[in-house]
Image (tube, rainbow, N blue to C red):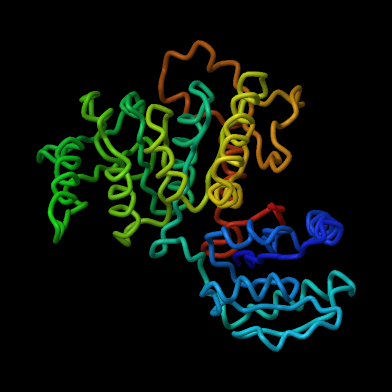
Amino acid sequence: MLPVRIVLAVQDSGYVEPMLNFIHGSEYVKRVQVTAFTRMDALLQYGEIPDLIVGEVEMLEAWLTEGRSSVPWVVLSEGEDNSNLIGDGLTTAKYQPLPQLLDLWIAQTRGSRVSKNDSYTGSTLITGFVSVLGGSGRTTASVNMAKQLGVLGRKVFYLNLETVNSTALFPTGRRREDGGSFSRLLYEIKSSQETTEGTEISLAQYVMRHDGLKCDVFEPSDHLQELMEMTAGDVEVLIDLISKSGQYDVVVIDTDNQSEERLRTVMEKSNVLLWVLLDDLISMYKTGMRFGHMERKEPVLFGQIMGKSRFIVNRFTGSLANPLPHKDMRVDGMLPYIPSWKQLHQEDLLLCSPIFQRDILKLCSELLGESDWGVTESRGGRVYG
């Protein structure tokens, strides 16, 4: 099952940090995803709707009067009056055994939370592969994940948003003969945005089965200027067109860093973000700078992005030489260094490494979990404000 998404609003960091440390070291790490706030202003800027908000009376009252009274709540009480609070809630002692307290929180969400995260569109899980620098192995990881999800029986769409689409290297086994090119699809998308009533786009005429990747794709385009001019709005329509078609279990999105606006759209539309890191100074430095800038300039976006991010170290050789560049980052997975890929001359060998695919399968299992969409939040919790 999906972890319960909880906002914890307590001004005392001395209460919050031991709580999160306990969650991280216990079975609750797979059952709850806690986003904690110790400042009122940071709490009120938070844009996501959780399954439950837990906290002190003053902070809860401010949250609920912001038009979010439909969210169940739990007051952590030390004898305060909570008669002004609105909505469906209860009061419990602030200090009690943590397992007992967490079980109460989880029980309070039953019957009120939906079976899927509100950001999901239909039943499709959107997974974005991102990195702060090129050459990190992002495409290799994403195509292998698309293939392994397909092998597992999932209906997968692999969406490559690189300016130079490197999936053209992999033989498809078939090509479209009816003119359903990606260029034509982009034309339709732009035309649909120019009319007030919109134009319905048929996805089927543009989709192509990729036999090597065991999933559906768009036929790669070699019109680079056209791809460079693709806007954030085009990307949003494209992702919605695929995810809302009802045809796919998972959309795997590969990105590049050519357009900040397009990359931001992918980050916002994805349910899970897989950040591909390398264990070197440049990768860690640039990643730290990127997240530090986001945290300072756009704290709300930062909270949303961190809540759905996983950090994957690629080309791992057995131990980390460099520390992760931000306090909220943890290593969620590792992909091995494959020496034979250093002078690769056959494209399909990138899809055939048993060692690499073994660790890709681990990532797939974490995405899928034990139920249909058991996206395991191994985070447990974070503190903002």
| Residue under the point 82% across and 61% down | 12
Rendering quarter of residue 219: top left
Res 101 → quadrant: bottom right
Q: Is residue 211 left or right of residue 208?
A: right
Which of 318/259 is in front? 259
The quadrant the N terminus occupies is bottom right
User: Is 298 situated above or below 260?
Assistant: below
Residue pictured at 86% horizontal, 57% vertical: 14
Instruction: Report whether 380 appears left or right of 254.
Output: right
Residue 255 at x, y = what percent? Answer: 42, 34
Q: Is residue 161 above or below residue 119?
A: above
Quadrant of residue 146 in the image? top left
Horizontal and vertical percent for residue 35?
A: 67, 58
Give the percent coordinates (x, y) of residue 319. 77, 26
Which residue is the extreme one toward the bottom?
83
x then y, percent, for residue 164: 32, 24
- Residue at the limit of the structure toward the left, as seen here: 178
- In the drawing, does residue 13 fall left or right of residue 174? right
Q: Nearer the viewer, residue 37 or 277?
A: 37
